Structures are given as C-alpha cells and as structure tokens.
Image (cartoon, rainbow, N blue to C red):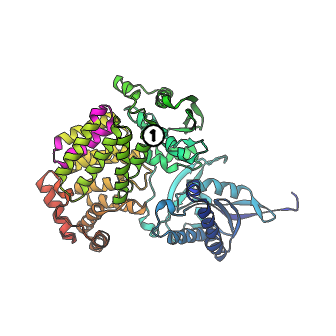
Amino acid sequence: MSDLFTRKLAAIVAADVAGYSRMMAMDEFGTINAIRRLHEETISPIAARHGGRVVKTMGDGFLLEFASAVASVEAAVGIQRALDKINGDAPEDRSLRLRIGIHVGDIVFEGDDIFGDGVNVAARIEPLAQPGGIGISDEAYRQVRDRVAIEWTDGGAQQLKNISHRMRIWHWNGAPNSKNVFVPVEPAPTEMPSVAVLPFDNMSNDPEQDYFADGMTEDLITDLSKISGLFVVARNSTFAFKGQAVDIPTVARRLGVANVIEGSVRKMGGRVRINVQLIDAATGGHLWAERYDGSLDSVFELQDAVSREVVSALSVRLTPSESKRLCHVHTTNLEAYELFVQAKATPYPPIPGRIEAARALFEQVVEMAPEFAGGYAGLSWLISFTALWGHEDPAKLGLRAEALAQKALAADVCFGWAYTALALALLAQRRFDEAVDAGRQGLDYLPNDADTNAFMSVIHAMRGNHEDAIKAADQAVKLSPNFINGPYLNVMSHCLFMAGKYEDALVWYERNIVRGGPVGPPALCWAAGSYQVTGNVEAAQNAVAELKLRFPTFGLKGWNLLALIEHDADRARIEALFRKAGIGD
C-alpha cells in the first residue's frame, strides 16, 4: 500500500438531516444557515468533548470519527439531546432532526479523509434510525451495552445495501427517559397481497404541481383501497417518506408490505406523463413498470389503467362490484380534486385552526365542483368531529352533518367516504344502529382506509362493543403504522379505556406522547382516569394539571364524549373515574 494511506480501527458516526429536501423547498436560505449553525455550535463542540472530530460535511450529512464506540455513542446521544432542546416546541415541519448510524470497523485514511468498511456500514445503518434516534451495529453494541446508561431495542438482522452479510442493528429512539421509550414495532407482513404507494415525484419545474402529484398518489391509494383482497397502507404513513431518498426493503419492512409502488408525474401544458413501477420489496426487482401519456382530460382514466395493471401484477381477483368501483370516476374537475386532497390532509393534528382551514378548503371544493361528493363529505366530517368531541349541541350539529353527507351520496352513491361521514353524523344524534350500518357501508367501499376503520372503532366504543372497537382500531394502526401525528394511537387508547383495560390504554397513550402525536382534552381525560385507577396518583394529577393549563375552559359538564355513550352504566363509570382523578365541570 502507498505511504499516503494509513489504516486503523475506529468508531464511525454517520448523521443525516431528516426531511432535508422538504425543508429546503420551504426555506432554502434558512435551512442552510440552520445546518451550518448545527455543525459549528452543536456537533463539532460535542464531538471534540468526547475526543472525536468531524471528518467532513456533505450538504445535509456529517461524518465523524472517534477512538472508541463508547465515546461515539455518548457524543451521538449528546447531539440528539441538544437538538431536542434547540427544537423546543417548534412544529415538526420546522424542527431539525438527525438520523445517526454508528459502526466500529476498519478505516483507511487519505489525508484528513477516511474510507473503508467502517464508513460504509455506518452510512448504511443511518437511514434505518428514527429521526432523533440512533442505530448502531452489533459490533458497536457489544462494546457499549454495559457502559452507556441508555436502553437499546433489538432491530433484528438487516440486509444492508452493498454489504454482503446480514447485520444485527440496535436502536435508541432519542426519548429523554429511555425506560419509557417506545420504538414502533414493525408490523408483521399480512398474508394477503400487500402494497404501499409512495408519494409520486413531481417532475415538473413548477413546485405548485406538488398537489397534482399528491393527488395522483392519493387517488391510486383510494382506488386500490376499494379492493378487499388487497392490503393497502394508508396515505398518512406513506407520505411520511415524501421528499426522501428511500431504501425500498426498509420502507416495506416498516410498513409491513411485500410490494411498493413508486412513480413520477410530469404535467406539460395540457398533457401529462405518468411513470409507475411496482417493486418486489424482498428482491428489489420490478414486477411491472409502465409509462402512460395522455391529455389532462383523460388523467383519471390513466389512473384507472394504473390501478388495473397493479391488481393484475399482484394477481388479485376482483369481485364484480369491486371491478365496477375501480373504474368509477368521482370527478373530472382536476383542480377541485387537488384541492380536496389538500383539504383532507389539513386537519392533522386536529386543532381548531387546522379544522377551520380545512373547512374553508372543502367549501372551495363545493364551489368549484358542486357535482363532486368530496366537498360535501368533507364538510360533514368536520362538523361531526366538533359534535363528537366538543360541547355544542351534538344532535343539532349531527343533523347539519347528516344533510351534507346525504348530499354527497346524492351526488355519488359510490363515494365511500360519504358513508363514513354519515355514520359519524348519526352517532352525534345517538342513532347507534344506523351509525353502525352506515359505517359498515363505508368499510365495504373502503376496506383499507385507515380513517374509515378508526371512526368505526369510535362508534363501536361508544356503544360498548369493545371487542369490535379494539379490532377496528388495531386495523387502523396497521394500515397507517407510520402516521406520527395522526389520531390512531389516541383511538386505540380511547377504545381500551372504554373497555376498562386501563393499563393497556396507558401504554398507547404514552406511545402517542413519545411519538409527538396530538394530545387534547379527550386523551388527557382518559389518561388521568387510567392513571388514577391503576394507582399512579401523581401521574393522574399531572395529567389534570396539564388539562387545566392548556385548556382552562374545558369541563365535564355538557361534554359530548360522555353524552354520546350509549349505556348509562358505562357513562356513570367513566364520569366517576374522571371526577375521582380531579376533573371537574
């Protein structure tokens, strides 16, 4: 070997900014400055304190070298905790978060730069880490497990890209209290054919066309979700990967599917080009790939063609009714549909400002396309949401929501989401049997829709059908395992609380807390009640204190969650728990 090179064993840290492309699109100058400050004020000083150095930066990435595994992990934990403080209460889309991968291996020096096995493996581990977390190789884990006071979760043996043998990976997800860390368990692959549709890339020069690409993805997911013999992951989970360079086997494993669809859309004047490929996640090989060219007027027919090709490639047999639904076009107004897609994603997390913004968007959809059921169904859904969880007269709100849901069905009897909206409107009026029937019709049209399953779970829980409620909530979580800011963990906690499974309810509540999900009055109430009944009085008091601090006008009197419980005995039991925990009128 040339005297320019030296070789040694070292601990290598590879770090990458999660969501870098999205952040650059939102604020290029601000993102560049934030990463520069991160390097100068956080990463370099912490690395130096642990005897390490920053070898180089690579846009949104950093490569660091340490003399020992212990020093590398202590520095990595210090960086993540410092970033957590820097981010504070900033919204998720404005927070700077790192994924960090660590490996101990042989490296080769050339000047100040490093190469070799240690670098390659650390770089392959890094994408497997959670944002804000750390992933380490088994070699590094053996050196730190008894010497660094944090708790690790076994991530199993993984096949890393361009690495000949499988390697066991260990995870720390970055929560300050490691004993209560929740690392999402990868869902077990379903036995039926399964697929996840990743967000289509916008290949146009105009960033405004992102909604067009998102609409294509949303519509394909919706079409495939109509097929009972196919497991389709919800958009809320797959859109978490938007703008990221993804490793297909890793994404498929996290989402619990055997196949992944990738695609791109280019809109040029009145023409559109769609490129789609269906990938076998186990091999990375293409099961099918196709390009579609056509006019914007025929874009929905092109989407139908894509759906049918995917179904054929997966060898899924359609029932006659499913075949008919698959070719049903709900609107030909492309602009209205793009706005509908934007509106449907707006209320998460469900806070008043976002709900009001979504309402305004749905009203625009109605104005633009009065023949399209989506606008009416969306408005009905938002009114019912207020009726279920607020203090306004639920029956009066339910009547308004019912009228809009019926208007949606009059416009399009095949629009599955309208049945779900109708079910919630009927629940608000305590018309429980009718609500269940409408909810089942929604599931018949959209068996793979996570929201439809989640709302069916709520209906069952309010009726006291606890087994059915938990089963539906579990399906919603499986369909959308990666939806961090979604309501499904809260829904599962609610169902378990209503069933009297208080310890299990707290497990899901705490998972939601760790994942940064929405925590409003309902979640705080059943957390307080569950902590109280399981003997953790201090935690119950803390939940009540947070409720009073964040929602000072909230009280049990006239709260619709209690009013809409079907059975008097269940209502009395739950209200007594809340009051015992210290929640008043």
The residue lying toward the viewer, choosing from 92 and 461, is 92
Q: Residues within 10 Å of mark 1 (few under 14, many from 20)?
A: some
Is residue 257 in sight in this rendering?
no
Residue numbers of the magenta segment: 409-433
Q: Position of residue 111 (x, y in %)?
A: 81, 64
The residue lying toward the viewer, choosing from 275 and 120, is 275
From this viewpoint, which residue is outermost toward the top?
A: 320
Q: Residue at x 39, y 59 (%)?
A: 517
Residue 410 belongs to magenta span:
yes
Q: Quadrant of the C terminus?
A: bottom left
Q: Is residue 370 above or below residue 253?
A: above
Q: Quadrant of the N terminus?
A: bottom right
Q: Residue at x 32, y 70 (%)?
A: 550
449 left or right, relative to 134: left
From this viewpoint, which residue is outermost toward the right?
A: 3
Per the picture, the main secondary structure of the magenta-coloured stretch is helix
227 left or right, relative to 395: right
Residue 242 belongs to magenta span:
no
Secondary structure found at label 1: helix
Q: Position of residue 539 (x, y in %)?
A: 31, 71
The residue lying toward the viewer, choosing from 258 and 448, is 448
From this viewpoint, which residue is outermost toward the front?
A: 367
From this viewpoint, which residue is outermost toward the left?
A: 568
The residue lying toward the viewer, choosing from 108 and 203, is 203
523 left or right, relative to 235: left
Is residue 32 in sight in this rendering?
yes
Question: Which residue, given by chain and number where applicable, does mark 1 sit on?
Answer: 335
Q: Position of residue 409 (x, y in %)?
A: 28, 35
Q: Position of residue 377 (x, y in %)?
A: 31, 42
Q: Disc 1 residue type?
A: Glu
